[in-house]
Image: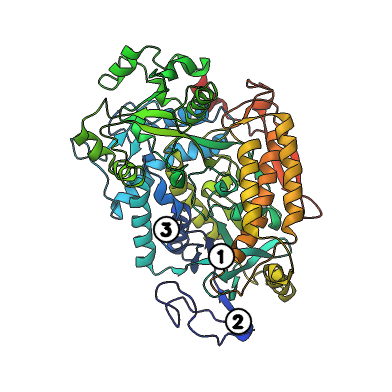
Amino acid sequence: MNTQTSGPAEGRHPMTGNALSGDAHGGMERHSYDVVVVGAGGAGLRAAIAAHDAGARTAIVCKSLLGKAHTVMAEGGIAAAMGNRWPEDNWEVHFRDTMRGGKMLNNWRMAQLHAQEAPERVQELEDWGALFDRTEDGLISQRDFGGHKYARLAHVGDRTGLEMIRTLQQRAVALGIDVFMECTVTDLFKEDGKIAGAFAYWRESGRFIVFDAPSVILATGGIGKSFKVTSNSWEYTGDGHALAMRAGASLINMEFVQFHPTGMVWPPSVKGLLVTESVRGDGGILKNSEGKRFMFDYIPEFFRSETADTVEEADAWYDDKKNNRRPPELLPRDEVARAINAEIKAGRGTPHGGVYLDIASRRSPEFIRKRLPSMYHQFKELADVDITAEPMEIGPTCHYVMGGVEVDADTQESAVTGLYAVGECSGGMHGSNRLGGNSLGDLLVFGKRAGEHASSYAAPLGPRPQVDEADVKAAQQSALAPFEVEGGENPYTIQSDLQQSMNDLVGIIRTRTELEESLREIEAFKVRAQTMVVEGHRQYNPGWHLALDLRNMLIVSECIARAALAREESRGGHTRDDFPGPDAEWGTKNLVVTLNAEGTGVDLHEKPLPEMPDELKGYFA
């Protein structure tokens, strides 16, 4: 097999990085690196930069084009206790907010590290050229967000994720890190239980690639494309989750899926598209079809002491935050999503099945266009709605999965030596519910840690784990299997049915009977998937791409449904209609899922939460 170790710059397409000739034997390329990062969102880019800076030969492999990662959709800001607006803010308060937002199911060490290190990571972004909005004193501006006691989200209007990706991408390119764009990883290789490399294919040509590398960092994002209504982009098919499971790693907290309270509901072509929480942070309120500001009816006891229970106090908070409590619209996302869902079910929804989000009656057109430029443009262009003059119709949309690969809090290494996971495809940091703004901080803090530790592991290795050629052949045969089927089913039909099933049976409100039905349906989808047929050839073939993605979507969907059935309580992003409240016993343990011995399904077991040190417990007394 021809071995090719040069970077994408030599003999490769200048935009996609694809090989320009077919000289590689059998259509197979081969590359050798110390660290291969799978994914080029905020987590992947930060991890790659850290690995490179630590001296590792590093490659980034991304399913889409560089700069198109789903991180660009993160609008509100980066949560970091910098104290620029409120000097009283510090990492201890941020840590407390994060744990309380996750209903105390978070990995305490990850929440602590995130709160402590996020300010430095934000400052680092600015040093690399990120252009943040400023306070009157010229400091990085920070805005209010749900679940955060103080205004602590560093922001760039409502385009923070875009600026973050721009900055990190520019840094990675300037450092000369090799990037393989429009390239999908389908398998991981091991030798003696340790990572040896990865198998991938070019989406453009269908040609295969083998990456020889002792360290692989998964930064592939979430699982939202398993649901019909989602804010997630097309890449979010649970690739990293499934790759890790097939390699022998475990997933944690998979029952906790965050439905962002505010996604567009009209027109149908944009249903689920995200409406940033910044709209509520800057004064927007929620109303039902009767014109009632309904969130006052849904304040949970857990947050009652810090939440305004009258319109007068809620409105006064925007001008005097010290002497008034927060508006109920700024409760954590799980609480707001459930409240909206309840209003719609009670028949008080909008004509298109949502509720109204109104900032037009509360802020000037100039303020809205300055603070929320993307939202103004999004609604004007896509829905013909002027948010400076009329309310938006919004409803919950599948947005984020709190669950992911079970990793060591300090290093982000999984149970498989040499395999790391970071960002949305890792689990533990957010517990049962993620606070807005904590995702971008999570990407930066743990991206850096994963890159450094992956590099540190790879550097001193003597003889490296070797990729078995039999495994390469098996990976190739597996990828080509859909072309061998005759008279089978179109993968798009199976995906559509899976998305509808997950939306209907494993959505915001869950019950035992519906979850059991979802598992039966997933088993049926697996059978149908065995006879998926792909027409045509490997070049430019989206049907083939989806057939491979569906393998990941099906196994991850089973993880979610099986964990949701096992957890007999309601907590954070998991609501059981038949177990409506939190249960103290369930609050002491995580659910962990692994691939079964046959490799066709999921095993589940309980695991005690890590014990929090007494000095940190004092923050919750």
Q: Is residue 314 visible?
A: yes
User: Horizontal placement of 236 versus 167: left or right?
Assistant: right
Q: Position of residue 96 (x, y in %)?
A: 47, 27
Res 319 quadrant in image: top left
Q: Secondary structure at mark 1?
A: helix
> Which numbered disc, 1 or 3, marks the residue that appears first in the sequence?
3
Q: With 72 as the anchor, is 23 left or right in this view? A: right
For image coordinates 68% across by 72% down, the residue present is 476
Q: Position of residue 272 (x, y in %)?
A: 47, 42
Secondary element type, mark 2: helix
- Under mark 1, the amino acid is Pro
SS type, badge 3: loop
Foreground disc of the pair 1, 2? 1
On the image, numbered disc 2 is attached to which residue? 27
State the image quarter where residue 402 is shown.
top right
Of mark 2 and mark 3, the one earlier in the sequence is: 2
Q: Residue at x 69, y 65 (%)?
A: 533
Task: Give the CA distance from mark 1 to mark 2.
Answer: 20 Å
Give residue 68's mark. Answer: 3
Question: Please, what is the three-letter code of the amino acid marked with disc 3?
Answer: Lys
Residue labelled with disc 1: 542
Query: Disc 1 vs disc 2: Cβ atoms closer than 8 Å?
Result: no
Q: Amino acid at mark 2?
A: Gly
| Image quadrant containing the N terminus | bottom right
Relative vertical location of residue 540 with respect to residue 443 in this rendering, above or below: below
Q: CA distance from mark 2 to mark 3?
A: 27 Å
On screen, residue 510 versus residue 347, left or right, reads right
Q: Position of residue 593 (x, y in %)?
A: 71, 44
> Between 51 and 572, which is closer to the camera in this rendering?
572
Taking the image as shown, residue 296 lies to the left or right of residue 575, namely left
Front residue of 70/523: it is: 523
Q: Is residue 152 visible?
A: no
